[in-house]
Structure formats: C-alpha cells, structure tokens
Amino acid sequence: MQVISTVREPLITGGKTIKDVTEDICKQVEGAPSKSWIAAFGLSFLLLAVGGAFLGDLFWTGIGRWGLNKTVNWAWDITNFVWWVGIGHAGTLISAVLLLFRQKWRTSINRAAEAMTIFAVFCAGSFILMHVGRTWLAYWCLPLPNTYGSLWVNFNSPLVWDVFAISTYLSVSLVFWFIGLIPDLATIRDRATGAVSRFIYGMLSLGWDGSTKSWMHYEAVSLVLAGLSTPLVLSVHTIVSMDFATSVIPGWHTTIFPPYFVAGAIFSGFAMVLTLMLVVRKVYKLEDYVTMEHIEMMNIIIIVTGSIVGIAYTTEFFIAWYSQVPYEQYAFLNRMTGPYWWAYWAMMTCNVISPQLFWFKKIRTSLMMTFVLSIVVNIGMWFERFVIIVTSLHRDYLPSSWVMFSPTLWDIMCYAFSFGLFFTFFFLFAKYFPVINMAEVKAVWKDSNPKVYKARRTISNDWIPENERVEEVVH
Amino acid sequence: MKSEHSHHTDHNLDERFVFSDGVRKTIFIILGLGVVFFAIGIAMLALGGSGHDAHALAFSGGESGSVDSGHHGYHWTNRLVVNFWHNNIYFVGITIVGVFFVALQYAAHAGWGVLVKRIPEAFGGFLPIIGGLILLVFVVDAFVGNHVLFHWVDPSLYIENTPNYDPIIAGKQAFLNTPFFIIRMLLFLGGWYAFYLAIRKNSLLEDLEKHTTSKYFWKIKTISTLFIIFFALSSSMSAWDWVLSIDTHWFSTMFGWYVFASWFVTGAATITLGVIFLKEMGYLKSVTESHLHDLGKFVFAFSVFWTYIWFSQFLLIYYANIPEETAYYLERLSSDYYSKFFFVNIFLNFFFPFLSLMTRDAKRKVGILKFVCMVVMFGHWLDFYLMITPGTLKENGGFGFLEIGLAMIYLALFTFVVAKNLAKSPLIAKNHPMLEESLNHHI
C-alpha cells in the first residue's frame, strides 16, 4: 500500500476519470487536423524544404560554402550539433533517470519529451553528416572491413567514440520510445472507426492484446531499457565533451567538462521540453495533465542545472587564473573581454543570470515567464557552445593566424534546415501519436485523484489534522 | 483518536536511542585499540624502525628537521601531521554529508527517508569538534610546524630574486595566503554549523507539536535549499583549499566535484551502516528492506558517480598529456610505494561495490550491505590518503600502526559524539508530514 502525503500536489487535476484520460488524449489523434496544425506543419515543411535546398547546394559545392577558415575550422556546424544533442537529453532523462528517482510527475511529459529527444538527435546527426564534407562517404566513420585500402577508423579519437555513443543512444531511445507507445497505439487501434487507421495503428501496435502476460513483458522490457538508457544518456554528452576536452586547446582542455556538459544538456533539454509542452498543453487543452506542478518541477530542474553550469563556468575561470598557465588565463580572459565578449555575456546572461529568476515562486509558476525563459535558456545554450568552440579556436598560438568567424547564408540556412526537420517531425508526432502516455498516466491516477487520495489516507490513519481538513476538500 | 499516531499502527514512533554501556564499551574498545596502535606507530617512528627505511634513507639528512631546511626535510612528525589532516578531511566529509543528506531529502520532497533521517541529522553534532581539529592542525603546521601540509605557507616562496622564489605559487598568492585561507575555513565550517543548527532546531521543534504538521517541514525545506546553495559553493572551494592546494602547482577543474563525490558516497555508506547497527540493536523496527534498498542504491549509484568523476579527470589528463597536469598522476603512478594504492583505490571504490551491490537482493540483505558499506568507507579513506599523502610526504609516506590507529581514534570519537547526539532526540520524527509515506514504503 502506498500513502501520499498532504504536502504533495496532485499529479492530475480536474477530477478526471480513467475514461477521461483516454478521451482527452485520443481525441487529438482521432480528430481531423486543425487549421492551425496545418499552418504550423506547412511552415515547418517549408523551412525544411528551403533549408534543404541550401543543404543540397552545400553537398554539391562543398563545405567551403560555410564561413569556416583555416583557424576557425569548427563553428556553427559543431555548435549546432552539440546544441541539438544537448536538447536530446531531456526525454531519456525524464523517462529513465526520473523513473529511477520515482518521480511520478514524469508520466505526463515523458512521451513528448522522448519524441523531442529523438528528433533532436536526428538534427544533431544531420550536422555530423554535413560537417564530414563528403557526406556520401560518412559510413567511413564505422569500422568496416578493410577492403577500401588503408581505411580504418582511429579508435583513439573521441570523434569515433562519439559515433558509437550517439548511434547507440539513438537506437535505444527509439526502441524505448516505441515500446512505450505500444499500449497507447493499441488503445487508438481499438477505438479506430476507419479501416485505414485501424490497419495502420494495428500494425504499429504489434498485436498488443493487453493481457497480463503482455503487460509483464512490457514492464520487463521497459525496465531493461531504462537501465540501459541511464548510463547511455550520461555517456553521450560526456563523450561530446571529450571531443573538446581531450585536446590541448586552452579553453577546451578542462577536466570539469564531462559532468558540466551533461548538466548543460539536461538544462537545455528541459528548457526545450517546456517550450514545446507549454504550447501543446494549451492547444490540446491538456492543462489538467501537464499541471502547474509539472511546470514548476521542470523549472526547478532548470534552476539546479543552470546553477551547476554557472558553478562550472566560474570554476573554469578561477582555475584558469589559479593554474598560472598564461595560455589558459588568456583563453578565458579573451572570452570575457575579447572580440567575442558579446557571445560570452549572452551566454552568461541567458544561462546563469536569468534562470535564477525561477527562485521566485511567482516567476516559476507563471506560464508567460516560463515560456520566455525557456527560450532564453536555449539561446544561452547555443551561445555556450559557440563561445567554447569559436573563442577557443579564433586565437591560434601564432598571432598571424588570429581571425574572426563570420557565418555565411549557408551557415544560417543549414541551421534553419534543422529547425524545419525538427518541427516537421514534431508536428507529425503531435498529430498522429498520443502526446501523453495514457497507460502511465492511468497508473499514477490513483495517487493523484483527490477522492481516492482522501479515502486511501483513511486506510492507514483516519485522523486528519484539523488545519488540513479544509485543504483536502478544496483539492 | 486525538493525537496518538502509534495508536493506529504497530509502529513505535516514540522510541529513543539509549546510549547504553554496551555501546559505549564497544566505542571505547575501538578507541583503546586505536590509542595502542597509534602509540606503537609513534614509538616505531620515533625510534626509527618504521619499516620504511628505504624511503627514509633516500632522503639523507632529513631526519631532524632543522629550522633552515624546514619544510624540505623529512621528520617523522611530518607523517603524524599528515595523518591528522587526512582524517580531518575524511571525517569532516562524512559529518557534513550527513547534514547535506537531510537537506537533500527536504529539498527533493523525498518521503521514503523520514524514518531514518535522524541518523544523518545526528552527524552534524561532530562539526564543532572536527572543525576545531581542522583549524588546529592547520595553524600548528603553518605557524609552529614544518609546513608539511601546505608548501605555499612558506613565506620565502614569495620573495623575488631569492633561490626559494616560486613564480607560479607567487602568482596564486591572492588566493593562497594564510589569513584569507583561515577566513575561508572559518566561513565554510561556521556556515555549515549554522545551517546544521537551524535544521536541527526546527526538526526538534516539530517533535514537540501535538500532531502532524507541515509548518516545520516547509521551514526546514527553505533552510535546506539555502544550505544546498551554500554547500554547492563551499564544498568545491573547501576541496581546493584543503586538498587541491597541497600539490600547489597542480590544478584540475574537476577536483572540487571529485572530493564531493568521495565525501558523498562515504557519507551514504556511513548512514547506511548507522541504520543497520541501530536495527541490529533492536531499534528502528519500522525500517524495512525497502528503506535499506534505497540507502543501498545511494551507495551503489554514488560509487558509480565517483568512478565517473575519477575516470573523467584521469582520462582527460592522461589523454592530453600536458606536463603541468600529469605531474599529479605521475607522483602516484610512477611511485613504487603509491602505485599499488592507486589500483586498490579503483578496485575498492568501483569494482567491488559495483559488482556486489548490482542486484536488487544484495541491496536488501543486511549482511551484504554492511560489508560493502564498510569496504566503501575504508576505500574512500584510502582515496583521501592517496589525495593527501603523496603531495605532503613524497616518498616518505607510510601505512602502518600509526595510520590505522589514528583512524580508529577518529572513528571512535565520531561515533561517540554522533551516538550522544542521537540519544538527545527521539529516533523518529513523528510529526513529519511524510512519515506515513516512509512507514508504508514498499519497493
């Protein structure tokens, strides 16, 4: 038996029944696409197409189209890659790590967050494919049998570790997400009135019959995948950080990078989940499932991870001074006061200073402020990667190689392409898949329904303190 | 019907820990043995038969530390000072992690641990003593002693155009100078103690209420959050001060979190052991396998976390192979004496807890949990040995009666103070609003 304390907020509000859960979530999938959905999807697809045209030109002509030069040989490409892969941490973190921490509020947001994760990793992967230059030979990153001459990957390179880390992460996340979808897809299949949707959702739900045996297998697989995902989600950004930190470039080589990158990834991932969920809950009227409590929890995670990132920035700065290594000292001073000072301060303001506003309950429970700050955080996290990559590279050891980086239209449009890709997938997901995990929400429903909640409380202890009696009724 | 909780359940919520003669006897036996070992250790060192003649001989002429060669020469008392410092750092970690653990429970709204929270809470009572010892050992070594612990306290390093001048250390003077160091020390220790007192006071006030109340819960939650912010900054900075600056030239941005990870997992193991010992004495009947399972998960997860931090720091320094940074690992790995500790450290703190606590069953069996927690406590004690000894004693480090004896003395002292503190309040926070969750915790 489980007891839920009165100091906990309910997970679902509005006195929803189990039937309501199915109804509220399925109706978005079953209904005809709304005009606003068609407009949003059309816009995303347009962005994908226009960005795709520039990308095609980049493939045809070569990455000389980008603003890279001999000194700054990584810039927006890798910035965008790290930014997207960072965003792609929240889903698995919510599903796997919050599961381990028994955070039940995750059930309302894990589905959309996982989908977002997968699409973000697609976008990240697209930059890896772009930046190799000859994308059609990208499979050379894999250790294939050596029939092409002296071709073999360098296992000493963290870039190769990254290929494995990200492809494994993507595969496991995809399987995890899909397995989680099966019972819900079966619900939609069973409710479907048209032959086409019954056929498609029937195929997708893999013959799910809802028997005890099926649930048993389902639970076992979920647990195994959660166990696999937890080290994976941490390893991905750890290895991304090692792309930089194993080098000897001042500003890149710092031992705090692995945990600090992971914290930053969670930070930006949660910000993106908030940006998307705030829109989805409004448009789909899911305010009783993604409640203020959910938003506040995510905002708290943003304060914690934002502060960790802030401490890491400060630690790097301090240790650079403390090390008395002139190169280190210069690299960090140059970040703050050099020609890229604006990028540095954009990063500091967006990542460290503005999330501190969430310490105020009024702000972290304000939808508008949360929405604005979630976007601010993602701008800040883009600048963080830009600062790390470009400011560390643009000052070479030889002053004759000192340059600035300026993006070309292709840099900008390839970034736009990734947004097109992301939102095209996300809008498709939001229309044709249940955005909230119905099965899991139903599983926590008992813990949050105010009526059941009160009755359960009396099982173990029928005495309710006087000052809390009134509050109980209000819930 | 009115105010009695226990009335409805089989739980004894009013139980108190009695610091019995039996418990005292056990502690005094550990203390007595520790003193004997310590005395033997000192006698062996003072009489020159420490068993480390080979090391000592390598430093010819260092046997009696004259005023001139001060911190350069090796005298057996150096080993004594380093031992005190090693145990100071190790035990202050366990102590403050106790308070931090309680704060985390409140800040994270965690209900499962209410039944056991008085145990880590009691750790805080050791703060004044361990804090005093830290201050005392530092002051003695810096002002009276041989500058064994911190090379940088030597004023001659900062005088330009003299043979002792060290431009790197001189560059760090704005941070590494004795007055500022002591101010920071007082700030961290004082701040930790103040937060502990605030949490403890409100926790005990809650007990005096007639029935369950959330008033103190929210108050402690606020204090806990503030403490976590303070601790996030002060734990890293204290690690820079008290441990990193021993190898004065060396630096690593990860180091603060590395020390924190080591402290935290040791604290989690100590809390788990405390709960197990109390259960074995017949207390905490309401604590079930589920609670132990959760504590075991902390020990398991943070052993992995420590390894993650350890590995990341090592790999990045090894890979980049920059001489300023590799110096730290060379000092340990290329030493005939320390290299074995280096590998034992990884085994005891990663492979052993990882493999033995992997299964669900292992985390729910008192016997296994007890043994693993003891190993983890010892393993991290060695981890701190490996952080502190090479930089201070160089190749004169030793491991014998002195080390084991002093650790036992500290352990007895810690246990005595914590047990005494624990006996002052009821074992269970009976008015905690999440107590019911903890009593009905099943996983």
Image (cartoon, coloured by chain):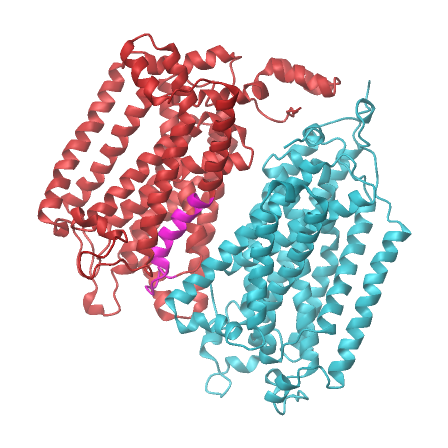
Chain colours: A red, B cyan
Residue lying farthest top? A193
Quarter placement of the C terminus of chain B? top right
**On the rendered structure, is B233 left or right of A87?**
right
Residue lying farthest right? B21
Secondary structure mostly seen in magenta is helix
Quarter placement of the N terminus of chain B? top right
**On the rendered structure, is B197 left or right of A67?**
right
Frontmost residue, A62 versus A139: A139
Q: Vertical placement of A118 versus A393: above or below?
A: above
Q: Position of residue A16 (x, y in %)?
A: 51, 13
Q: Position of residue A223 (x, y in %)?
A: 50, 34
Frontmost residue, A113 versus A72: A113
Q: Is residue A71 magenta?
A: no
The residue positioned 71% from the left and 50% from the top of the image is B370
Region rendered in magenta:
A231-253
Looking at the image, can residue A294 be seen? yes
Q: Position of residue A318 (x, y in %)?
A: 45, 61
Q: Vertical placement of A50 versus B80: above or below?
A: above
**On the rendered structure, is A329 left or right of B177?**
left
**On the rendered structure, is A460 left or right of A415?**
right
Q: Is residue A240 magenta?
A: yes
Residue B407 position by quadrant: bottom right
Residue A431 position by quadrant: top left
Q: Vertical placement of A26 versus B115: above or below?
A: above
The residue positioned 47% from the left and 52% from the top of the image is A311
